[in-house]
Amino acid sequence: MGAVLVAVLGASLVGCSSTGGKRAEDARKAAAAGGRAAVDTPRWTFGMVTHSGDGDTFWDIVQSGAKQAAVKDNIKFLYAHDDEAQQQAQLVDSYIDKKVDGIIVTLAKPDAMKGALARAEKAGIPVITVNSGSAESKKFGALTHVGQDETIAGEAVGEELNKRGKKKALCILHEQGNVGHEQRCEGAKKTFDGKMQNLYVTGTNMPDVQSSIEARLQTDKSVDAVVTLGAPFADTAVKAADSAGSKAEVDTFDLNEKVAAGLKSGDLGFAVDQQPYLQGYQAVDLLWLYKYNADVLGGGKPVLTGPQIVTKDQADELEEYAKRGTR
Amino acid sequence: MTATAPAPAPDTQSDERLLKTSPLKKLLGRPELGSVVGAVAVFVFFAIVADSFLQATSLATVLYAASTLGIMAVPVALLMIGGEFDLSAGVLVTTSALISSMFSYQMTANVWVGVLVSLVATLAVGVFNGVMLTRTDPPSFIITLGTFLMLTGMNLGFTKLISETVSTKSIADMEGFASAKDVFASTITLGGVDFKITIVWWLALIAVATWILLRTRVGNWIFAVGGGEEAARAVGVPVAATKIGLYMGVAFGAWISGQHLLFSYDVVQSGEGVGNELIYIIAAVIGGCLITGGYGSAVGAAVGALIFGMVSKGIVFAEWNPDWFKFFLGVMLLLATLLNHWVRKRAEATK
């Protein structure tokens, strides 16, 4: 369907662009390694269930890591997501019903997933938790947790803000109800010597995000740093700061192509990356190791994929990888 | 409601309303017929494309998904037959769970106290909706939209104010939790398969709602206020009381769903439930309820919920890309509505 559409559109176009676009993307893809399994283990099926909403770039990157590892490890990889806790638990149930060989799950709303993880354990399916829920992972019987400790990541942000001599910061929470987000802002508050305030915005509604930040910056001229908790919101915060005539530096959690470009151009101060690609990749790989060799990584502690503070210095190569959809 | 107005009888002596209609004609006149046909089609479809769909455990998961939606879809269908909407139903579920949890925790009360306080508070929201609607001018769409926004804000605001985080604190170690969990969130094992108790609640609600609609005076009132408010008032139907009662019915469903959320997970996320109100309406419409009121059935809404459960979980069992789920839902909604419309037209044509 998409291919047909592209073909029809392509045929009807008179002028072609010699830069960028689908052609450049295809060339990049061709340059990347061909996908073939590197092992001869049986074809196991792993299912991943996340708390992502519809159409979230971050989870696309996690998936691309997971898929890459799945190809390498000869795994059939399934993915499902729902941002309502009850629905997410039901999706895990569905995979247990399917008798998959391994489950990867996020614990953004840990209590809701407790029962589902217990059922997986009863069915003898190994579980690895990723991204959120490092505190509960072991308690719920998961093999290990791959992700970033949100409090530690927040603390890193606070320290970085001190280094940059900031005095008053805003923490933009775009998902009310997400415990991990609260922890990030709490952590930043803890280590930041200046004053930090929380601002709640509706992450599913970008214009609303922009106007909320704008309004806050207009009313409080002394804010000199805005910290967003997701890459897509960094760009919006920059726009908001511009139109509010504020000199505040925008910093963000997580990366994407735009953030990398923003770091390069100096629109953004720094980004705290938790390396989502690594979370997906490692989760699949660790499950494979467990199935193949009963290996468990981390010694009972979470395997941390962040925080990694990235600035203008690393922006060049990051931009290239972000374009590829792996950072 | 079966519309049984047959062709002009040769015997003009008898009252045309007392004439017997053939069973087939009766069946064709049922509002839920279209949805039952749709449900069978969806079931067969997923049985073919997803090999694990027909396992007992998979069907239990599907039934659970359908019941959590159906508990709300049934009272919402009654409300829609009565000609009104409730856009606050989705967040009211969360509100109900939050009230139980926080009241029990803050007062260090037996959990059942919180559950009952929550019942009163949730029903009060239903009464508020109903009274606002019957005492003022705006349509229910606008009034419940206001309630929806207020509840969404109150869920977050109060939770943050009282618990200092966006989710409530665990009440799993408090007195009464175990027995309340048995009532609202336990699992019944039949033949080695775990069925959730929500399925029982769901079936009970279908039975009660169907009995009210088809066998009681109140049922006639509901159809009457939905069919034509002024006409109903003229023949002495208590319009205001009926509508307030219908909103209380939705609130009762929200209370059951909310308690289920709480006792399944013992912690409630304050930001959830937004958007579910439309899914309840979709289930009711797929089940043959008319958006204009006066026509529909509780069984139909339950079947609508079942279809929804089968599709949402069937996509997972079939290993399809979940990105397309909403697309399928939209297609299904349109097909079901067209089918319902066609069935109704046929039924009316044979009169």
Image (cartoon, coloured by chain):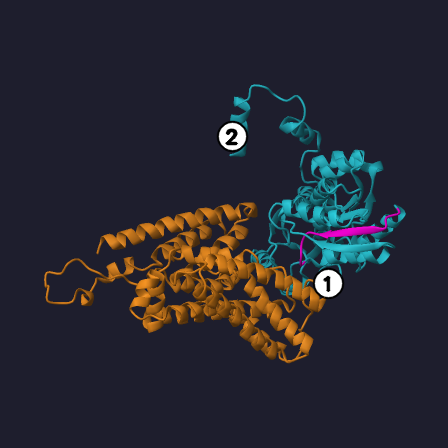
x, y percent for residue B291:
40, 55
- Badge 2 and badge 1 both on one subunit: yes
Indicate the colour of chain A. cyan
Left/right placement of residue B245 relative to residue A23 reads left
The residue shown at (33%, 65%) is B224
The residue shown at (47%, 47%) is B330
Letter of the chain that mark 2 sits on in the rendering = A
Q: Which region shows up in magenta?
A: A165-177
Looking at the image, which is closer to me, A206 or A133? A206
x, y percent for residue B157:
66, 63
User: For the C terminus of chain A, which image quadrant?
Assistant: top right
Which residue is outermost to the top? A14
Numbered label attached to residue A4: 2
**Residue A280 shows in the view:** no
x, y percent for residue B186:
56, 72
Q: Would you identify the image quadrant in which residue B113 lies?
A: bottom right
**Residue A36 shows in the view:** yes
Q: Amino acid at mark 2?
A: Val
- Is label 1 in a helix, a strand or a loop? loop
Left/right placement of residue B285 relative to residue B257 reads left
Disc with the residue nearer the chain's start (2 vs 1)? 2
Distance of mark 2 from mark 1, alpha carbons?
Answer: 47 Å
Residue that label 1 marks: A136
Q: Amino acid at mark 1?
A: Glu
Indicate the colour of chain B. orange
